[in-house]
Image (tube, rainbow, N blue to C red):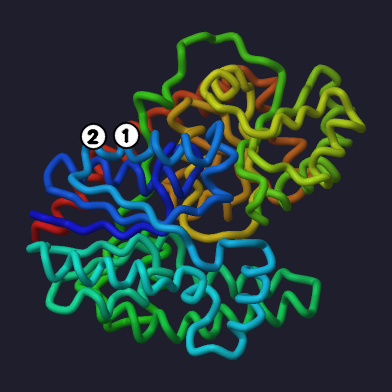
Amino acid sequence: MKILWLSHLVPYPPKGGVLQRSYHLLKEISKEHEVDLLAFNQKSLMEPLVPSLAEGLAEAKDHLGNFCQRVEFFDIPSDRSSFSKKWLALKSLFTKYPYTLNWLLSDHFHQRVANLVAQEDYDYVHFDTISLAPFLSACKGVKTSLDHHNVESHMLIRRASKESNLIKKFYFNQEGRRLEQYEKSLCPKFDFNFTCSDLDTERLQVITPESRIHTVPNGVDIEFFKPSGNKERSSNILFIGTMNWYPNIEAVQFLGEQVWPELKLRLPVATADIVGANPPESIRKFSLEDERFHVHGFVDDIHPILDSAMCYVCPIKDGGGTKLKILDALAMGKAIVADPIACEGIDVEDGVNVLFAETKEEYVECISRVFSEPGLRERLEKNARTLAVEKYAYEHIGHQLSSLYSS
């Protein structure tokens, strides 16, 4: 089959959750289908990952061209400056579409999609997020699919429910409610929708029962994320996540302000490693105040630091979809201590391949058990790797999506 893949980001390098899903699904379906890629360039997403934006885009185009027949990148009109984004966010209170649909609007991109659909004999046009849905009008007469990395309206409404700032609370709530109405009207127009977990499929089905919705789970590169076999473990806890995403920032603040002060008293040998691009001042301060709490910023190859960690912690209490950082840690055979919300949509069991914790007391207790009980730690590590290999390898997941197109 011939597929036109529309992306809200340049899916390379695959470092970070959303990049990994888009890159690996694109790569896997290209093994069975002919794929053209049109992608928006999110500068803030790529810049921390490459020496320069120009070099990064050139390398991405070259690499993606190894399995895509056509690769084209487009600037985002609203990405000209931080003021442009803020103005658009404010203006979106009064426009037809909510901000989630407004931020990618581009006449140039729309025209290019329309021209290609008219010129090429595509069997499918794939939309990699609902933010691309306004371009559906350029794809008349062609079958379409829509990927939901998260159920965006659910994520925004949940964020609003936890927000203490009344202005932000109002904004996130109205954005979520308006977007929910668009999900209700837009999703049935696609030949099929797919989410990354059965839980998100259920959530979306409630919003838009008329839509055809399938689960195509997130996955992990089990050949890259593979334990080295070295049994030596540093006496550390580890969290990995890009620091321009609010759930990651809140998770590290919770670790630094509430968990760490009690944990270091109970485990005097423990250290903490926080890895992720663009850590704000509120995160960097932890490493300035305590030499055992390390804030690394962006790390090009996270494999060594993941491999040597004794305990992977993930106190994320918000967001949507499934957390690829959990899948990476499972594949690396890590002993994981995480909030149940961080594991939503992933088939883990408390006490089998993860330890659940919600309060600071529970985190301190669970992490202490991982440190002090080698038998428990080894059992969690073995079961984690087994689950990743048997259920979340991208090769199987990519074939599942290819089969959906073919059927």
Residue occupying the point 67% across, 79% down: 171
Residue occupying the point 20% across, 49% down: 400
Residue occupying the point 55% across, 67% down: 78
Q: Dots 2 and 1: beta carbons under 8 Å?
A: yes
Q: Is residue 211 above or below residue 350?
A: below
Q: Quadrant of the N terminus?
A: bottom left
Q: Quadrant of the C terminus?
A: bottom left
Q: Is residue 293 above or below residue 217?
A: above
On residue 269, which mark appears?
Answer: none
- Find numbered disc 2 in the image and state the secondary structure of the residue it sits on: loop
Q: What amino acid does circle 1 point to?
A: His
- Which quadrant of the figure has residue 188? bottom left
On screen, residue 393 versus residue 160, left or right, reads left
To which residue does mark 2 refer? 66
- Which quadrant of the figure has residue 393? top left
To which residue does mark 1 refer? 63
